[in-house]
Image (spheres, rainbow, N blue to C red):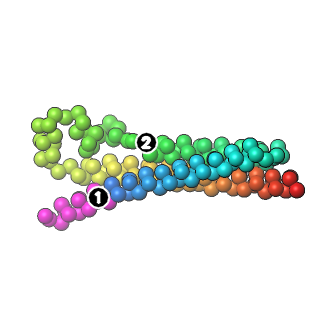
Amino acid sequence: MNYQDTALTAAHAEVKAELARTDTKASLLLAFIGAMLAGAWSVATNGHLTWIALAFGAAGVAVLLAAAGLLLFTVRPNLGGDRPQGFPLWAALTPDEIRDALREDDRHAHIAVLARVAVLKFGRLQRAIDLTYLAGGLLVVAGVLAWVGGS
């Protein structure tokens, strides 16, 4: 195994690991958003809130829903678009065509496609986290307004 082969194998494994890491983070954030939505629903339906607290709470819930939608889009499978690499392409091949395709070392193409997918996923995840922060702030303001209004 030469240096280039070792480097291609390492890069391929790294980009696949980054994709898995992004999907794991997105899944955890989706669960957190679900818990925040459940909590907001519980407070909104069990309390007597002022209209301003309800407005801030509704805005927070809307932003949470936008973040959840972005996260769902982030974890949505991407089969490579116009030029699929790896398993999406293999699904359309016969066993003999797969064997012929595997004779060529096209890890460099896989790395390029997977790296672009990973960068897109990281960007969406970052925006979803920013939206979650914004939603949390709106819900905190709604909570403070409810507490002050209820006193």
Give residue 108's position: percent from left, percent from top: 24, 52
Residue ranking furthest to the bottom: 3
Q: Quadrant of the N terminus?
A: bottom left
- Three-letter amino acid code at disc 1? Ala
**Residue at position x 47%, y 55% from top?**
25
Label number found at residue 141: none
Above or below residue 86? Residue 4 is below
Residue ranking furthest to the right: 151
Residue 141 part of the magenta segment: no
Residue 31 appearing in the image:
yes
Mark 2 secondary-structure assignment:
loop
Give residue 60's position: percent from left, percent from top: 68, 48
Residue bearing the label numbered 1: 13
Give the magenta-colored segment's residue range: 1-14
Label number found at residue 76: 2
Mark 2 → mark 1, Cα distance in angstroms: 21 Å
**Residue at position x 69%, y 56% from top?**
137
Q: Is residue 74 left or right of residue 40?
A: left
> Crowding at label 1, few (<14), some or many (≥20) Cα neighbours within 10 Å?
few
Q: Is residue 89 left or right of residue 131?
A: left
Residue 127 appearing in the image:
no
Q: Quadrant of the C terminus?
A: bottom right
> How many marks overall?
2
Give residue 76's position: percent from left, percent from top: 43, 42
- Three-letter amino acid code at disc 2? Arg
